[in-house]
Amino acid sequence: MAAAKAIRTGDATAGARLEYVRTRRVFRLGGWHQNGLEIEAVELPASKLLTELGVAPDELGATPLFLVDACVRQGGRGPLRQVLAAFPNEVEARKAFRDVRGDRVEDDEWGQILTIDARCRLERVCWFGEPGQIGLDGADPGVTPARARRWGPRRLRGSAGR
């Protein structure tokens, strides 16, 4: 088993140590004083420590992903075509969004930039036109996945439906 990762601060006379024990998902806070005498370590569950410090778990999770979702005509004429592309940052997504939008927009063309956070929630950043209340997979972009689906107990085979 690998040793716990630790951050230490101080000198030989006094200091503090913060370790993360991955196998137990706890932070261990300890230290020393008076020329090296150890202070008994305190263990805090990771979720409690983050909550107490006001840190949301998704702040430490994956960075958001930016999606450009649009329905436009190529070269301003012809049938509508769907464009869907993912970008690691907002700057690249906005550049692609401007390229898709072009100089003019017909009434039935639309586009939007959506972000997907670590909890898989969609948020609309900017848009043009109206997508006819349709976003990814036919869902309204303002609706989180938990609200978009109806969750409930499934009926078992052979049940009488009572």
Image (spheres, rainbow, N blue to C red):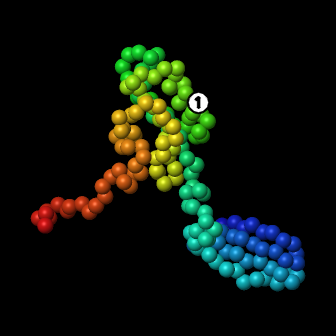
The structure residue drawn at horizontal position 38% and vertical position 43%, both measured from the top left corner, is: 140
How many marks the image carries: the answer is: 1
- Residue 125, x across and y down, in percent: 52, 41
Residue 46 visible? The answer is no
The structure residue drawn at horizontal position 46% and vertical position 50%, both measured from the top left corner, is: 121
- Residue 57, x across and y down, in percent: 56, 61
Check the picture and name the quadrant holding the N terminus.
bottom right
Q: Secondary structure at mark 1?
A: helix
Q: Is residue 6 left or right of residue 89?
A: right
The structure residue drawn at horizontal position 33% and vertical position 52%, both measured from the top left corner, is: 149
Residue 85 visible? The answer is yes
Label 1 CA crowd tier, 10 Å (few <14, some 14–19, many 20+): few
Q: Is residue 93 above or below residue 56?
A: above
Q: Looking at the rendering, which quadrant does residue 38 occupy?
A: bottom right
Q: Looking at the rendering, which quadrant does residue 158 occupy?
A: bottom left
The residue indicated by pointer 1 is 95
Q: Is residue 114 left or right of residue 14?
A: left
- Residue 30, x across and y down, in percent: 73, 77
Q: Is residue 9 above or below residue 126?
A: below
- Residue 79, x across and y down, in percent: 36, 19
Q: Tell which of 1 and 136 is nearer to you.
A: 136
The structure residue drawn at horizontal position 42% and vertical position 46%, both measured from the top left corner, is: 142
Q: Is residue 97 above or below residue 65?
A: above
Q: Tell which of 90 and 14 is nearer to you.
A: 90
Check the picture and name the quadrant holding the C terminus.
bottom left
Q: Looking at the rendering, which quadrant does residue 154 occupy?
A: bottom left
The type of residue carrying mark 1 is Lys
